Amino acid sequence: MLRLLPGPFHRSLLRSAHALRLWWWRRTARFVRGCNVIVANPAGHVLLVRHSYHARNKWMLPGGGLGRHESPLDTATRELFEETGCRLERAEHLGTILLDRSGWTNAIELVTGTTRDTPVADGREIEEARFFPPDTLPESATQAVRAMIARWLDAQNGNSA
């Protein structure tokens, strides 16, 4: 149904709803489960996205909230496809990362995998989606993204994370 709304109005609603959601999570000291996806293309570059509704100038990993009774692998597959049109292949759960978000806790299930698809931002939730070499991420990539990609690289090299 939201797809029927004009894009600018939809993005405005997303920004308002997200601000309200963050306020509620802080007020209630929520424990929120989400999922981030580190997906690499055949060249080994990782996919990052820029959201339309928060931290719009920051590059982040694709992902989103876990649905009730949804596994991290199912969430990663769904969110990646919804946000970028990419299909997740060879998905693996790398672990859980707990982040203190100033009054609420974000438990991020980190999933990795590959895709052969070219990302296309959905134009609503996601403004831009691009692959970057993991050793030369854009300056505006968040510290959390950098830490998650470092963990992924360590796991690929056989180091414990």
Image (spheres, rainbow, N blue to C red):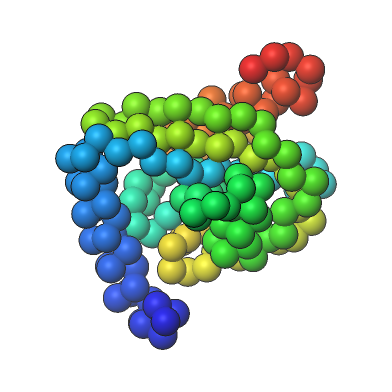
Residue 103 location in percent, x, y? 24, 31
The answer to whether residue 139 is seen in the rendering is no
Residue at 40 percent of width and 28 percent of height: 99
Residue 111 against residue 53 in the figure, above or below: above
Residue at 28 percent of width and 67 percent of height: 12
Residue at 74 percent of width and 45 percent of height: 91
Nearer to us in this view, 13 or 70: 70
> How many circles with numbers are drawn on the protein?
0
Left or right of 116, for residue 7 = left
Q: Quadrant of residue 25?
A: top left
Residue at 55 percent of width and 42 percent of height: 36
Residue 100 location in percent, x, y? 34, 27
The answer to whether residue 120 is seen in the rendering is yes
Residue 105 location in percent, x, y? 35, 32
Q: Quadrant of residue 106?
A: top left
Left or right of 61, for residue 105 = left
Nearer to us in this view, 61 or 75: 75
Residue 40 against residue 52 in the figure, above or below: above
Q: Residue furthest bottom?
A: 4
Q: Quadrant of the N terminus?
A: bottom left
Q: Quadrant of the C terminus?
A: top right
Q: Quadrant of residue 80?
A: bottom right
Q: Residue furthest front?
A: 69
Residue 147 location in percent, x, y? 54, 25
Q: Residue furthest top?
A: 159
Left or right of 36, for residue 127 = left
Nearer to us in this view, 149 or 103: 103
